[in-house]
Amino acid sequence: MHVAIIGGGIGGLTLALSLDAAHIDCRVYEAATRLRPLGVGITMLPHAVKELQALGLLPGLLAGGVETNEIIYASREGEVVWREPRGRAAGYRWPEISIQRATLQSLLLEQVDDRIGQGTVLTSHRVVRVQPREPRVDMGFAPLPDGTVPPPASADLVVGADGIRSRIRELLHPDEGPLHTPGITLWRGVSRTERPIGSGMASVVMGNARAKFSCAPIGQLDDGGQLVNWTAALRAPVQSPEAEWNRHAGATAFLDAFQDWSKRLVDIPALVQASDEVFEYPLCDRDPLPFWHRGPVTLIGDAAHPMYPHGANGSAQAVLDARRLALELSRRTSIEAALRVYENARRPATAELLAMHRAGGPDSILDLYETRVGDATGPLEQVLPFHEREQIARRYRKLAGFDAQTLNYSPTMTPERRVR
């Protein structure tokens, strides 16, 4: 079996390593001229770290990121509405790790080169045609920067791991329509701080659905400071969802909205102004699909289920997709049967998660507090009782797949080794 993976992001590279562990041949086709990962941060939750550890990547993750042990939700006035331990501090067998996307993608790419071979990832290969022709799938590519056209390729299975603007998704669902946006603009950056924020191992989320700020440490500096990833979200005029993403922007576009927020947990203006680059893009997702595969063509990650970044779960879900797909391919001689089981396992779960993210995900605890505090005064326990806050957090962990009781005692999705 030979698998063509379209897209060299976190999901695509994790899939390549997982297929190699199962002795399934693969190649990755990446549209970019060279892999230049965006330098913002992401969080790998314990269910994703569990699977990456099974691939032998935990030492690299810990060396390149920060093991976070707590998340804090607070109002703009700085009142802590909810806090909970995370990762090993919460009883998981695996840590929660915040890390630069570029660092994680480079780690994955390095392992693909070492284990499978340099040349496994082909850059400047933008797929424009996918044509199933029994028993293979033919692929055609756009011209290279020099004008030459790469030769066509074929595979037994094509996997679209090409993100929210997936060409493979478009080929499977040509009438889907534009991206969905709720009218919120995001600004993101990474800042160097002279000293850690708080304990130096906590993620912080402040605000509500109209204006929100979140940050997490993603790297330790030699001078004792940290790299901190931050995201600001505002209901503001949104550029077209189809416009250039991750465009450079200035802090003046949004920082006034946060000037009077409490600095008890985070000095937002100081943190933002310490960032070398600020990126702007619209908050977007897509509606759940009725199916992910047709014949020997399927989807993983944001190509299958792009969702709002509440709960720090997008990259983690891509890892889970990749691992489950490789597992099912390793177990079955029929590609169709493997794709059917994979989709039945992952599509309903991610559709439910997407719907919860549209409703605010775990951040909805701040929206509920904001609503309640407008109608009542008094201690937090009277405004928003502990059991309600705990229920929101627990429901999200369960739906997203990282309930500790279940996760700690379930096996990894390690593929079975096939005969090459």
Image (cartoon, rainbow, N blue to C red):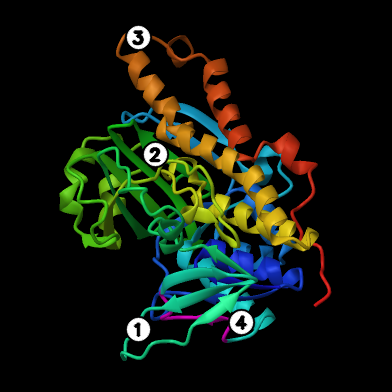
For marks 3 and 4, give the CA distance.
59 Å
Q: Residue 373 appears in which quarter of the rendering?
A: top left
Asked whether the residues under the numbered discs 1 and 2 touch, taking CB atoms below 8 Å apart as contact, a structural biologist would say no
Q: Is residue 95 visible?
A: no
Q: Which residues are magenta?
A: 119-126
Left/right of residue 226 with respect to residue 403 in the rendered view: left
Q: Which residue is mark 2?
A: 265
First in sequence, mark 3 or 1: give its number.
1
Q: Of tags 2 and 4, which is closer to the observer?
A: 4
Q: Residue at point 49% right, 83% down?
A: 152
Crowd rating for badge 3 (residues with CA inside 10 Å; few <14, some 14–19, many 20+):
few
Name the residue type under label 1: Pro
Q: In percent of the image, x 38 and y 81: which residue is there?
A: 33
Q: Dot 4: within a 10 Å radius of its alpha carbon, few (fewer than 14), some, or many (20 or more) residues?
A: some
Disc 1 and disc 2: Cα gap in Å?
51 Å
Q: What residue type is disc 2 on?
A: Leu
Q: CA distance from mark 4 to mark 1?
A: 25 Å
Task: Please tell me the numbered disc located at residue 377.
Answer: 3
* Residue that numbered label 4 is attached to: 113
Q: Quadrant of the N terminus?
A: bottom right
Q: Which residue is mark 1?
A: 143
The span from disc 2 to disc 3 (Cα, nearest Å) is 22 Å
Query: Magenta: predominant secondary structure element?
Result: loop
- 4 and 1 marks in contact (CB < 8 Å): no
Which sits earlier in the primary sequence, circle 4 or circle 1? 4
SS class of the residue under badge 2? loop
Say which element carries label 4. helix
Q: 264 above or below 121?
A: above
- In space, the residues marked 2 and 4 are separated at their CA atoms by 42 Å
